[in-house]
């Protein structure tokens, strides 16, 4: 959520900042703004509610600014309604300090009341403005911007990524980070800060990732980083190795469709480097055979779609390992007195590696003595650095808010991890291990087969897009799959959608089924196909309009009862959800397209959720 970009260099800052903000649009926002300091110390500010197109028009594409140093922001409202006044950057009362902020200042009321008692007048309803006003308060007394910023950081509570400029210091700006992502970028005769690398890739691939409590003083010549005690820190530099074109639409109408179509290749990149001589290999993990055999319980902690990966993982890992596996919502985990300890393996799943709830859950698990293993996409992210072990999905950048390829790569990586752990524990037969190796090898090709045949999905979406309430039903892995299919539909099409275990229909849910209610029945889990069919008959008898998804081997049987049937190739039961999720993603996409929705940037949603 929200996006920050800061620039110090030799070129005009305005167009560069605007371009960077455009690359951060996918994170979700409702307003945007830019502040630039001219060489003679004039602080210029432009901000507006709405899309970046409005800011571009207001600033003549950023050309209206004079100066080579500035900060920009896309805001997703948390404190104060989306309007011009509440947009970032925020100014101090004297207009000499401008601040952009991602996160939440939890004690802003206390600080605001203090400053108001000192005669300070506030313009906005945001928590962020207290940072700008408090910096001015301390700066007036010391005349040292860095000293004023440190005093502020030791007084505020909460999460923040901050970019700060001051008209009295036009040669540098300050960045600070706690529990919200922020990186530094090093270009030729310029330096950046940004919420993620997509904002600056056109200018540099060389970055450092700021850690909690760090503050950076940034000028065109580079960045000096300090820890919370004002001691200099030497930051390791990393080279971003994915192509800039990965963050472009590449001829597709939407990023979401592009990323759906990229899934076979993304999954191949996740699988292939980890299979050698017909066996799964995870290099660099600290997990020993003795520890793996001592694990008595696994918790899979995540949010949103990553949590749904964990629900699939529960079924698959319990089948493979014969120990309890519990999927846990990260936002609930840290507040629920979780029963974990040294014999608990806690698997943390996050696309960005910066999801705040998940980061806090990771810290809780470590404090209780559990071994933590992260599955993330972003190299060098906070969760990747803090976990005891990390596995990268290598999915490349995902721009659409609604995740697709991140889900698919997380899912197959978790499946592979389960097989690897089962092999270490001796709980999988040689026969099943061999079957799974063969199935993993075929999976990308099978996924491509599904994505090469989308006409039936488009047609059914055109028949179903006007429903306002949809129910997904399934059993076992199909129930877990339905949770993700339901989320995809609701988040981009705004249709009310829920997923239910088929066996729970008679325990209340079936009272909601009336004539014309759309029910999406999932029958890809072969051991319970007959049970699912009984649930299909139940909803049909109440007048439901049923769309069914099953496997090729059961398609003809399903068609005896249901008119609208989609099918996917047969695969090993553990990998079947990796194929079955594809039609559900496409169905959600084409329904949203029919409804005229903003598919890549759904209302009220953000890509990276960095507040609780």
Image (cartoon, rainbow, N blue to C red):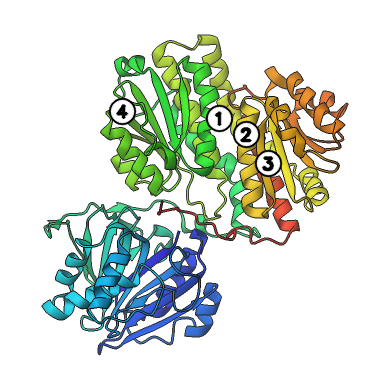
Q: Residue at x 71, y 34 (%)?
A: 509
Q: Is residue 103 above or below residue 20?
A: above
Mark 2 secondary-structure assignment = helix
Is residue 535 positioned above or below 170 on the image?
Answer: above
Q: Earlier in the sequence, mark 4 or mark 1?
A: 1
Q: Which mark is residue 584?
A: 3
Kindly identify which residue carries mark 2. 481
The alpha-carbon separation of the residues under discs 4 and 1 comes to 22 Å
Question: Is 328 drawn above or below residue 318 in the view shown?
Answer: below
Look at the numbered discs 1 and 2 and tell me whether their residues touch, using CB distance below 8 Å. Answer: yes
Is residue 174 something one can see in this rendering? yes
Of the residues under marks 2 and 4, which one precedes in the sequence?
4
Q: Residues within 10 Å of mark 4 (few under 14, many from 20)?
A: many
- Per the image, label 1 sits on a secondary structure element best described as helix
* Viewer-nearest residue: 317 or 129: 129
- Contact (Cβ within 8 Å) of mark 2 with mark 3: yes
Q: Left or right: where does residue 512 sit relative to residue 175? A: right
Q: Please name the residue shown 43% across and 21% down the image.
A: 420
Question: What residue is disc 1 on?
Answer: 312
Q: Distance between the Cα atoms at labels 2 and 4?
A: 28 Å
Quadrant for residue 51, please give it: bottom right
């Amino acid at each position: 959520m929200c996006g920050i970009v800061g620039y110090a260099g030799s070129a005009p800052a305005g167009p560069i900042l605007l371009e960077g903000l455009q690359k951060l649009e996918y994170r979700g926002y409702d307003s945007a703004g830019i502040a630039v300091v001219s060489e003679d110390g004039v602080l210029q500010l432009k901000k507006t509610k709405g899309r970046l197109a409005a800011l571009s028009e207001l600033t003549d594409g950023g050309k209206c600014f004079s100066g080579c140093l500035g900060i920009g922001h896309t805001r997703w409202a948390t404190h104060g309604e989306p309007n011009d006044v509440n947009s970032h950057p925020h100014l101090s009362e004297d207009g000499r300090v401008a601040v952009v902020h991602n996160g939440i200042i939890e004690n802003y009321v206390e600080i605001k009341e203090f400053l108001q008692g000192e005669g300070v007048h506030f313009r906005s309803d945001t928590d962020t403005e207290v940072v700008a006003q408090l910096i001015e308060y301390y700066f007036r007394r010391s005349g040292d911007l860095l000293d004023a910023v440190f005093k502020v950081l030791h007084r505020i509570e909460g999460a923040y990524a901050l970019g700060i400029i001051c008209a009295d210091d036009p040669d540098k700006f300050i960045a600070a980070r706690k529990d919200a992502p922020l990186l530094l970028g090093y270009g030729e005769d310029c330096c950046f800060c940004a919420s993620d690398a997509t904002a600056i890739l056109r200018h540099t691939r060389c970055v450092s990732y700021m850690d909690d409590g760090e503050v950076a003083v940034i000028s065109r010549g580079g960045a000096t980083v300090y820890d919370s005690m004002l001691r200099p820190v030497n930051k390791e530099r990393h080279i971003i190795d994915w192509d800039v074109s990965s963050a472009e639409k590449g001829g597709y109408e939407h990023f979401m469709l592009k990323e759906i179509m990229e899934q076979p290749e993304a999954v191949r990149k996740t699988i292939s480097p980890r299979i050698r001589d017909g066996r799964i290999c995870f290099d660099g993990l600290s997990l020993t055979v003795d520890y793996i055999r001592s694990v008595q319980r696994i918790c899979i902690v995540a949010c949103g779609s990553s949590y749904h990966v964990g629900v699939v993982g529960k079924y698959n890992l319990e089948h493979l390992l014969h120990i309890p596996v519990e999927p846990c919502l990260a936002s609930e985990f840290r507040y629920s007195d979780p029963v974990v300890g040294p014999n608990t393996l806690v698997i943390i799943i996050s696309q960005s590696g910066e999801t705040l709830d998940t980061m806090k859950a990771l810290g809780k698990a470590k404090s209780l003595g559990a071994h933590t293993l992260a599955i993330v996409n972003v190299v060098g992210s906070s969760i990747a650095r803090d976990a005891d072990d990390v596995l990268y999905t290598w999915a490349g950048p995902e721009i659409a808010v609604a995740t697709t390829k991140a889900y698919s790569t997380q899912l197959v990586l978790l499946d592979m991890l389960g097989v690897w752990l089962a092999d270490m524990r001796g709980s999988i037969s040689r026969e099943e291990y061999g079957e799974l190796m063969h199935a993993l090898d075929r999976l990308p090709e099978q996924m491509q087969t599904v994505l090469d045949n989308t006409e039936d999905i488009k047609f059914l979406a055109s028949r179903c897009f006007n429903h306002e309430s949809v129910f997904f039903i399934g059993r076992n892995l199909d129930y877990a799959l339905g949770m993700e299919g339901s989320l995809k539909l609701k988040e981009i099409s705004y249709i009310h959608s829920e997923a239910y275990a088929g066996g729970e229909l008679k325990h209340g849910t079936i009272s909601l089924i009336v004539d014309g209610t759309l029910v999406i029945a999932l029958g890809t889990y072969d051991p319970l196909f007959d049970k699912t069919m009984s649930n299909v008959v139940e909803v049909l008898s109440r007048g439901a309009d049923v769309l069914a998804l099953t496997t090729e081997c059961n398609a003809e049987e399903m068609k005896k009862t249901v008119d609208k049937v989609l099918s996917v190739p047969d695969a090993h039961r553990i990998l079947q959800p990796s194929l079955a999720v594809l039609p559900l993603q496409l169905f959600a996409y084409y329904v949203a397209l029919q409804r005229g929705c903003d598919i890549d940037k759904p209302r009220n949603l953000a890509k990276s959720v960095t507040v609780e």
